[in-house]
Image (cartoon, grey):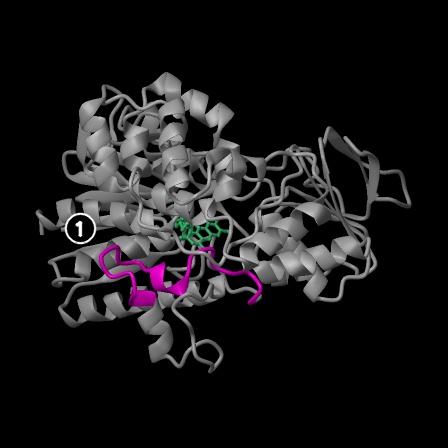
Amino acid sequence: MKLGIIGGGGAAVALLAALTCDRLPDLDVTVFEPAKNVGPGRAYLPDSDIALLNVSAERMSVLSDSPGHFLQWVKERGGLNGGPVSPAAFLPRRLFGEYLAAVAAEITDRLAGRGKSVRTVRSPVIRLRQGPAGFHALTEDGRRFDGLDRVVLCVGTGGPVDVYRLARSPGYINDSYPLSAQLAAVPRKAHVLVLGTGLTAVDTVLFLLENSHRGGITMASRNGLLPTVRTSATAPELRHLSHAAVRAALAADPVMTGERLLALLDRELREAGMDLNRACAEAVPGESVARRLRRQLQQARDGGALWQPVIIEAMHESIELIWHAMPDAERRRFLTRWHRKFVSLLSPMPQRTAIRLQAASDAGQLRVVRGVRGIRPGEFPLPAFLASTGAGDIAADIVVNTTRPAAAAIPEAAIPLVEGLVKTGVARRHPLGGVDVARYTNRVLAADGSENRNLFALGHLTAGTHYYTSSMLIIGRQARIVADQLLRHC
Ligand SMILES: Cc1cc2nc3c(=O)[nH]c(=O)nc-3n(C[C@H](O)[C@H](O)[C@H](O)COP(=O)(O)OP(=O)(O)OC[C@H]3O[C@@H](n4cnc5c(N)ncnc54)[C@H](O)[C@@H]3O)c2cc1C
């Protein structure tokens, strides 16, 4: 079988790993990936060691049924920078990128030993057509690849969105990853305005502080909410939101609503001696950043904030079941009312990072504001930018953009490809973003709703159908499902 994989990040490697973990199939693979290496994708590029994974080493793996695979690889190559590694450690993201590249290289070698190949084409696919002799892919550099029997779309996420159209302004940095390259030229005394207050914004600030930045730093977003601080507590066994419990609940009543989900979450938290209101109080804007960080650090050290591992665990166990049981109108309501709060509770920052941010805040170097209304280039010679916010006008020399693209937004490099597929009726857009895929197979749905047995999508592009795809654990699960279908044809 000739398999085309479009995109060569974590999802592509998870698929290759799932295809080859039990036996070496009769398979010729072409991976289309414009970046230098297959593996790191956008999330795990070579970068400073301060950019950490948000999942512990023992649970980051490309193989969904072998969660310790990454940890084992790290140990075999001598730990982190020669030191031992705890399974519970949150390791640098670049290390996971090296692991992905190593897994891809190892699979390529094994297939080559069998006379099969994994070929990499370093150009984005801009058009994909399906005909009687399979798929034809056209790449940006004008090459054509014919006769692909099956294709999997793994195009991932896009970079931040240039909301204020500042791309041409000197001093504007539209994407802060990789930190070590993008932020290297920021003058130490510059006043830096970081757009966004999520994990990427936190990484950005931490990188500046660790590199002896002396100027002021302002973080600004609509709600001004930093991620919460990661607790040292672990999740108790789930009773209401485990996969089995949610299945049973849905067997009794198949329709899930936002309120029902919150009620289940509340019951789960009460089992652990907490309640949902206390969790949600951590995602209410308005409190001073120093006070919030101090309280959350205390809670995190004491093993409090149990709601955090409960929500994270429940999300990984049952979100697909829950999302699929929600009617469309309910999903929209969830995205408008709860999605942002959920994401902010789901993605905590390490305690060490919180301590650094708190020190900078206490020293008056860091502040967090909310209600950004607009940013305009300033008058010559200084300041370079003027931002109007809920806390008044803020002058900044440098603006770093860390705002997230909308849920299920299609990455820029894949827009011509996806638009072409939609135009020819081979795919259709999902009303909530990305492309529409079948719930249990990830087969791409054609304009008339029929399942394409030869075209699949993995990861972020399927977020309209599956909601939460920002996790290697979930991407690995999807990869297994797609690989099982492909293997039936090998
Ligand atoms: C900054 C960041 C940090 C993250 N950290 C974690 C974490 O710690 N733990 C975790 O579990 N999850 C994390 N995630 C979520 C998720 O695991 C990653 O996004 C994951 O790497 C997604 O892999 P992917 O292959 O789907 O996408 P990507 O990594 O985005 O890779 C997609 C690839 O497709 C290529 N591409 C795009 N369009 C085309 C085209 N037309 N033709 C050919 N190639 C194309 C791109 O060049 C890119 O390399 C993180 C995500 C981000 C963005």
Q: Is residue 170 left or right of residue 335?
A: right
Q: Is residue 68 magenta?
A: yes
Q: Is residue 9 magenta?
A: no
Who's the residue at 11% across and 58% down the image?
26
Who's the residue at 27% across and 70% down the image?
106
Q: Say if residue 202 shows up in the picture.
A: yes
Q: Residue 34's spot in the image, x, y percent?
A: 43, 53
Query: Is residue 131 placed above or below 28 in the rendered structure?
Result: above
Q: In front here: 401 or 78?
A: 78
From the image, tell me which residue sits under label 1: 2
Q: Is residue 424 left or right of residue 168?
A: left
Q: Is residue 341 left or right of residue 357?
A: left
Query: Is residue 415 placed above or below 368 in the rendered structure?
Result: above
Q: In front here: 432 or 296?
A: 296
Q: Amino acid at mark 1?
A: Lys
Could you tell me how many numbered marks the image carries? 1
Label the magenta part by its dominant secondary structure: loop
Q: Is residue 118 left or right of residue 25?
A: right
Element marked by disc 1: strand
Q: Residue 341's spot in the image, x, y percent?
A: 52, 34
- The residue segment tinted magenta is 49-70
Q: In front here: 206 or 158?
A: 206
